[in-house]
């Protein structure tokens, strides 16, 4: 199953459904302890992090992840995963959106941005899945697809120009909600919603809501 789920836009990115054969394999594995999972991910060529939920502490990183993110594993282990996010507000929204999935043991995925150790911005797709552990430590494997796609990095900088209210309306819009529904949910006037939406469209360089959806689903932003 693949495709984009506009109903789950998170501010840091958009939740997506991706092919998950490696997730099925991880979930079918024995209940290893955390140290064994740390050894297991070293064999993966794809960047992988071990994250403990709900506090989202990094417990491990394979060589591919360290190389892509510019950290040594020892610099990541024990750190709050927020250090890899472009800003703390988006980190919190990512956690809030994923918490529902985590509570029921379901994988979730997103598309957005991460920050390297040197401050560089990379486009990212995360696929986060819970795995069984013998010590019941609540760990999840976070599979990363990272790229320095110029269009997606440019979109990140445009997103930074949005006000908090504009970004809030953007999230509701990408869930498929119309201006009247947004106005009711946010307890503001229809005209105010339309004004904020016009401003965010201008800042993101598009003219219509249809073009806005296309901006977040263009294939070149997902290669």
Image: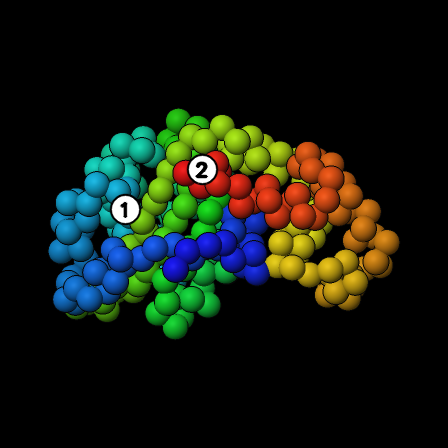
Give the labeled residue for mark 2. Answer: 123
Residue at left 24%, top 37%?
A: 64
- Secondary structure under badge 1? strand
Q: Kindly tell me whether residue 48 is visible in this rendering.
A: yes
**In the rendering, which numbered label is found on residue 4?**
none
Residue at left 67%, top 48%?
A: 210
Instruction: State left or right for residue 87 relative to residue 141.
Output: right
- Camera-nearest residue between 142 and 117: 142
Name which quarter of the figure residue 183 lies in: bottom right
Badge 2 crowding class, 10 Å Cα cut-off, few under 14, some 14 to 19, many 20 or more, is: many
Q: Kindly tell me whether residue 114 is visible in this rendering.
A: no
Name which quarter of the figure residue 45 lies in: top left
Q: CA distance from mark 1 to mark 2?
A: 15 Å
Residue at left 46%, top 47%?
A: 111
Q: Is residue 10 placed above or below 184 in the rendered structure?
A: above
Q: Is residue 164 placed above or below 146 in the rendered structure?
A: below
Quarter holding the N terminus?
Answer: bottom left
Q: Position of residue 192 (x, y in %)?
A: 83, 52
Give the labeled residue for mark 1. Answer: 48
- Secondary structure under badge 2? strand
Q: Position of residue 50 (x, y in %)?
A: 27, 52
Q: Position of residue 5 (x, y in %)?
A: 52, 57
Q: Position of residue 75 (x, y in %)?
A: 28, 37
């Amino acid at each position: 199953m693949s495709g984009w789920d506009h109903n789950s836009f998170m501010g840091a990115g958009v939740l997506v459904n991706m092919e998950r054969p490696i997730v099925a394999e991880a979930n079918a594995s024995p209940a290893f302890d955390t140290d064994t999972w740390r050894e297991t991910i070293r064999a993966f060529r794809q960047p992988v992090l071990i994250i403990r939920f709900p506090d989202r502490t990094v417990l491990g990183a394979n060589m591919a992840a360290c190389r892509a993110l510019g950290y040594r594993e020892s610099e990541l282990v024990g750190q709050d995963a927020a250090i890899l996010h472009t800003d703390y507000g988006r980190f919190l929204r990512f956690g809030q959106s994923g918490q529902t999935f985590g509570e029921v043991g379901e994988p979730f995925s997103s598309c957005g941005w991460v920050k390297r150790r040197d401050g560089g911005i990379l486009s990212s797709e995360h696929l986060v899945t819970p795995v069984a552990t013998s010590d019941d430590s609540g760990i999840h494997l976070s599979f990363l697809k990272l790229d320095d796609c110029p269009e997606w990095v440019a979109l990140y900088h445009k997103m930074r120009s949005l006000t908090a209210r504009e970004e809030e309306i953007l999230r509701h819009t990408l869930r498929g909600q119309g201006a009247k529904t947004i106005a009711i949910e946010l307890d503001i006037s229809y005209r105010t919603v339309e004004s904020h939406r016009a401003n965010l469209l201008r800042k993101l360089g598009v003219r219509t809501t249809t073009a806005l959806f296309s901006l977040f689903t263009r294939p070149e932003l997902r290669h």
